[in-house]
Image (cartoon, rainbow, N blue to C red):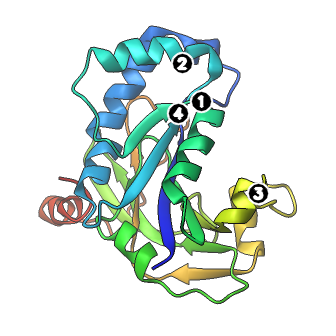
Amino acid sequence: MSRKVAIEINFNNYGFDPQRLTKVWLERRMDIFRRFTLNCLKAQTNQDFLTVVKLSKESGELMQEILAEQEPLPANIRFGTHIESVRAILAFAEGHEDIYIARLDSDDLYHRTFVQQLYSVEPKPDTMALINQNGYLWDSVNNEMAPTFHRSPQFYVYLYKTEQYASGYRVKLPGRGTHGNVIDLPHELLSPRNYINVVHSSNTSVKKVPLKDRLSESEIEEVLREFMI
């Protein structure tokens, strides 16, 4: 199959908070990444993927110092600047016709079969995005979870021809250019309940788990086993 799968995570390359360039902030967010997202990536049933975790240019060296002090990451998970991340994706996709780039935040989760789903799906030729509308919202502090649905959430995949991606072409979102506009692209839906949006003590905006359809503690544990090691 002439396709490769990459997962793109923005770590601290966006935003105006100067704290995102400090060692304290980086170490705290790295702890969150290791507790949640890293365990989801390690759990993927198909490990033929590359994850690029994107850093601001100003914090690249500091982050490398932090990484050097911690348990080594798997070879398919790499921290780097935007330019370094693009180069890594292109090297990974070399010789393959297509590159599928999934978006994920550094504290959220994809189902352990997600990468395999991206290798198995056969989208129509004009499809530009795959959208995950079904997932869960999990308050990891209070251990509350409920299923959730979003028409156009932040959990989506852009489908590129490798040659086009290498030439600099990027999908341009219509309208306001937000996650909510991905649904306006030629798209297809991935039907499984594929994501967990994680609430933790360091969220910038704290979401509340709805009372309706909340899962029991044992049901939460069962769901988490499907997403993390």
Q: Residue type at mark 2?
A: Gly
Say which mark, if any, is on residue 11. 4
Say which mark, if any, is on residue 60. 2
Question: How dense is the environment of label 1, judged by Cα within 10 Å: few (below 14), some, or many (20 and up)?
Answer: many
Counting residues from the N terminus, which is met first, the one under dot 4 or under dot 3?
Answer: 4
Q: Is residue 154 positioned above or below 26 on the image?
A: below
Asked whether the residues under the numbered discs 2 and 1 touch, taking CB atoms below 8 Å apart as contact, a structural biologist would say yes
Q: CA distance from mark 4 to mark 3?
A: 20 Å
- On the picture, is 205 further left or further right than 223? right
On the image, the x and y values in percent for residue 31 come to 32, 27
Question: Badge 3 is on which residue?
Answer: 170
State the residue lying farthest toward the left.
Answer: 218
Counting residues from the N terminus, which is met first, the one under dot 2 or under dot 3?
Answer: 2
At x 38% / y 30%, what residue is drawn?
A: 201
Q: Residue type at mark 4?
A: Phe
Seen from the viewer's position, the closer of residues 113 and 161 is 161
Asked whether the residues under the numbered discs 4 and 3 touch, taking CB atoms below 8 Å apart as contact, a structural biologist would say no
